Image (spheres, rainbow, N blue to C red):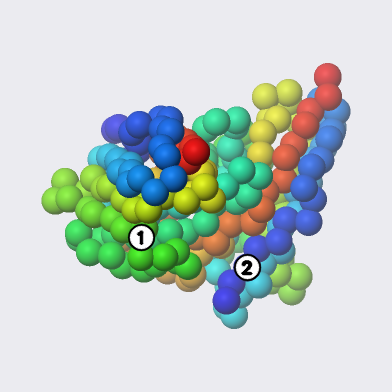
Amino acid sequence: ETGVTQSPTHLIKTRGQQVTLRCSSQSGHNTVSWYQQALGQGPQFIFQYYREEENGRGNFPPRFSGLQFPNYSSELNVNALELDDSALYLCASSLESAGTEAFFGQGTRLTVV
Amino acid sequence: AQSVTQPDIHITVSEGASLELRCNYSYGATPYLFWYVQSPGQGLQLLLKYFSGDTLVQGIKGFEAEFKRSQSSFNLRKPSVHWSDAAEYFCAVGAPGSARQLTFGSGTQLTVLP
């Protein structure tokens, strides 16, 4: 059983640029959630995808968008990067059913300069 | 809106000592409750979870947590800490029936002295 994998592990971007982060779900999982973890903070929920549709969103602006593919892998896209977008971005996969937990990937460290 | 409070930003214990990390939550009903651990530069590993039933739950690495509805708390405990337990610990809540849209506390950094 493979775990949740994210790529790249580290990334440096310039303010105003766009970035795409990728996540492969754990085998058999059909739901993907994305979290932003700023330095010294707990993770904050960005959004969740189920069956290729956004199925819940936290308090993040529209320049944060995502995709989920038929194989349940996912992308997080951030447009018009700001310095405050510098953070660890975590992907979590799970089954869309009650009584199951989310499994997290190692994260992508994004630095915006 | 749901929220999670971890009142201790940093805790230092000696190896072999007991440990208790505090977590209080605010939610209209009994949520799903979780403790995760994060080592430097790593993702989150689930230690234990509470969905329903027995209020004392056992997790991995010798950790346990007790759900107290009257106090809206879900404190994490370990009877004897090992040096490898040094990490950051996060308490999280999810809406009943959903373990996917989690609200996390701000974390407690654990330092273990030899």
Q: Chain of mark 2?
A: B
The spot of residue A88 in percent (x, y) is: 50, 41
Asked if A41 appears above or below B88 in the picture, the reply is below
The spot of residue B1 in percent (x, y) is: 57, 76
SS label for mark 1: loop
* Amino acid type shown at disc 2: Ser
> In the displayed structure, does residue B4 sit left or right of residue A12?
right
Callout 1 environment at 10 Å: few (<14), some (14 to 19), or many (20+)? few
Q: Chain of mark 1?
A: A
> In the displayed structure, does residue B91 sit left or right of residue A33?
right
* Residue where numbered disc 1 is placed: A63
Outermost residue, bottom side: B28
SS label for mark 2: strand
Callout 2 environment at 10 Å: few (<14), some (14 to 19), or many (20+)? some
Which residue shows up at 61% across the image and 43% down it?
A39
Quarter where residue B89 is shown? top right
Of labels 2 and 1, the one closer to you: 1
Residue B44 appears in the picture as rendered? yes
The spot of residue A84 in percent (x, y) is: 54, 50
Circles 2 and 1, Cβ within 8 Å, touching? The answer is no
* Residue where numbered disc 2 is placed: B3
